Amino acid sequence: MVPLIDTHAHLDDERFAADLPAVLDRAAAAGVVRVLTIGVDLATSRAAVGLAARHPVLAAVVGIQPNHAAEAAPADWDEVTDLAARPEVVGVGESGLDRYWDRAPFPLQEDYFARHLHLARRLGKPIVIHCRQAEADVVRVLRAEFDRHGPVRGVMHSFSGDADTAAACVAVGLHVSFAGMLTYKTAADLRAVAATVPADRLLVETDSPYLAPVPVRGKRNEPAFVRHTADCLAAVRGVTAEVIADQTTRNARELFSV
Ligand SMILES: [Zn+2]
């Protein structure tokens, strides 16, 4: 079994509180050799760092997700900045823009996105980007960043946009990560997009505990299930599961230095 890396999970979620060791055992049995656990605010960023310190299979990513920007205090950002520099932390985020939920004013989301981009660049760590119904805005910000500073190291996580958006992400330097949605019957358009992303920019993730892939759709998602999404990606691209596992794992190791 070729190893896989789940590049995006929220293992601090209370749905893992009772059985995280068993979840990690199942991930190991499924050949998942690293899992990135992602913060969305200060509390979950702290939790991610704590989990990574306790479980060697985990690495942390810290940040304030756009839907949490309004509730963040100024001191929260200062502490996230300090956490981001720690060795257990392999990336900055998740950050980005979200027009689906109306939980934070858009200018405030843009301000936080800019801060994360700056922090990631300053630390030399990749950025993890969340984008929901804000593709044009995210691409605008990323192109400006690219024009000013050159290629953006990072990932568009749980990609759900169209082929033009994927191409724009690749053009500014990003990786593109696919989650369980790729396996859904109604996601033919997304599978067509997944076939167009250059192999050296592909990643896979679960986004646990959300949106488990087919055939475990509807269950609590967990890192072991990333194998289903990787297998689907292989089928979509007409290559073997081994080829996709090998490629995405190499990409994740290189991008996040894990
Ligand atoms: Zn997430």
Image (cartoon, rainbow, N blue to C red):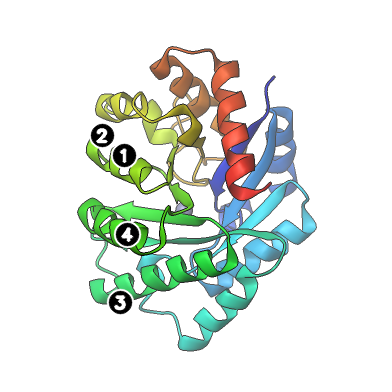
In the rendered view, tell whether residue 19 sits above or below residue 187: below
Tell me the element at label 2. helix
Along the polypeptide, which appears first: circle 4 or circle 1? 4
Query: Looking at the image, can residue 18 be seen?
Result: no
Along the polypeptide, which appears first: circle 4 or circle 2? 4
- The residues bearing labels 2 and 3 have C-alpha atoms spaced at a distance of 28 Å
Q: Which residue is mark 3?
A: 108
- The residues bearing labels 4 and 1 have C-alpha atoms spaced at a distance of 18 Å
Q: Position of residue 117 (x, y in %)?
A: 44, 66
Disc 4 Cβ-to-ligand 1 distance below 8 Å: no
Disc 1 Cβ-to-ligand 1 distance below 8 Å: no
- The residues bearing labels 1 and 3 have C-alpha atoms spaced at a distance of 25 Å
Q: Which residue is mark 1?
A: 166
Q: Position of residue 182 (x, y in %)?
A: 38, 30
Q: Which residue is mark 2?
A: 163
Report whether 137 appears left or right of 17.
Answer: left
Query: Looking at the image, can residue 209 be seen?
Result: yes
- The three-letter amino acid code for the residue at tag 1 is Ala
